[in-house]
Image: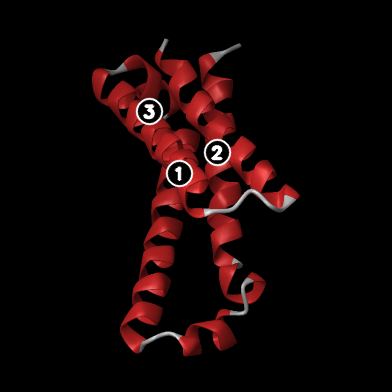
């Protein structure tokens, strides 16, 4: 597969997850659920989610506008490796923190494994 197209796929993948994270307030009813937490915990959850959204949009930006730099340079390869490790870590955390009692958990675990793979492929 063409590395440029693969990196565009990484951009689409990142964009999808950025948009998904934008929906967390509604999906998880954070307007009600986060009120149950201490103010600090509620703030930390929202801030971390906003930073993840920012990071995912930035990764998508890099993939869409600098695909050649990502797979042709040493720095680009390190970034791709880092993004792959991000998704590998997310996969491991999925296994640690979630019970595998609903099909959606399996779906997201599979998606995180895909992220791990698609970001590392252009490095080789």
> What residue did someone put label 1 on?
90
Q: Residue at x 39, y 19 (%)?
A: 71
Sequence-wise, the earlier of marks 3 and 1 is: 3
Q: Say which of 81 and 37 sits in front.
A: 37
> What residue did someone put label 3 on?
80
Q: Secondary structure at mark 3?
A: helix
What separation in Å lies between label 2 and label 1 (alpha carbons)? 7 Å
Q: Say which of 19 and 117 sits in front.
A: 117
Sequence-wise, the earlier of marks 2 and 1 is: 1
Q: Nearer the viewer, mark 3 or mark 2?
A: 2
> What residue did someone put label 2 on?
112
Label 2 crowd bin: few (<14), some (14–19), many (20+), radius 10 Å: many
Q: Position of residue 108 (x, y in %)?
A: 63, 45
Residue 122 vertical position relative to residue 23 in the rendered view, above or below: above
Q: Position of residue 57 (x, y in %)?
A: 46, 51
What separation in Å lies between label 3 and label 2 (alpha carbons)? 15 Å
> Would you say the residues marked 2 and 1 are in contact, meaning their CB atoms lie under 8 Å apart?
yes
Sequence-wise, the earlier of marks 3 and 2 is: 3
Residue 18 vertical position relative to residue 62 in the rendered view, above or below: below
């Amino acid at each position: 597969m063409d590395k440029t197209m693969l990196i565009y796929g990484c951009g689409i993948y990142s964009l999808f997850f950025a948009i998904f994270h934008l929906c967390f307030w509604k999906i998880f009813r954070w307007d009600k659920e986060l009120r149950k937490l201490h103010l600090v915990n509620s703030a930390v959850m929202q801030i971390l989610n906003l930073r993840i959204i920012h990071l995912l949009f930035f990764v998508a930006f890099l993939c869409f506008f600098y695909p050649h730099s990502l797979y042709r340079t040493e720095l680009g390869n390190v970034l791709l490796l880092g993004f792959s490790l991000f998704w590998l870590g997310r996969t491991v955390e999925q296994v640690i923190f979630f019970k595998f009692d609903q099909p959606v958990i399996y779906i997201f675990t599979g998606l995180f494994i895909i992220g791990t793979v698609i970001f590392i492929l252009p490095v080789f």
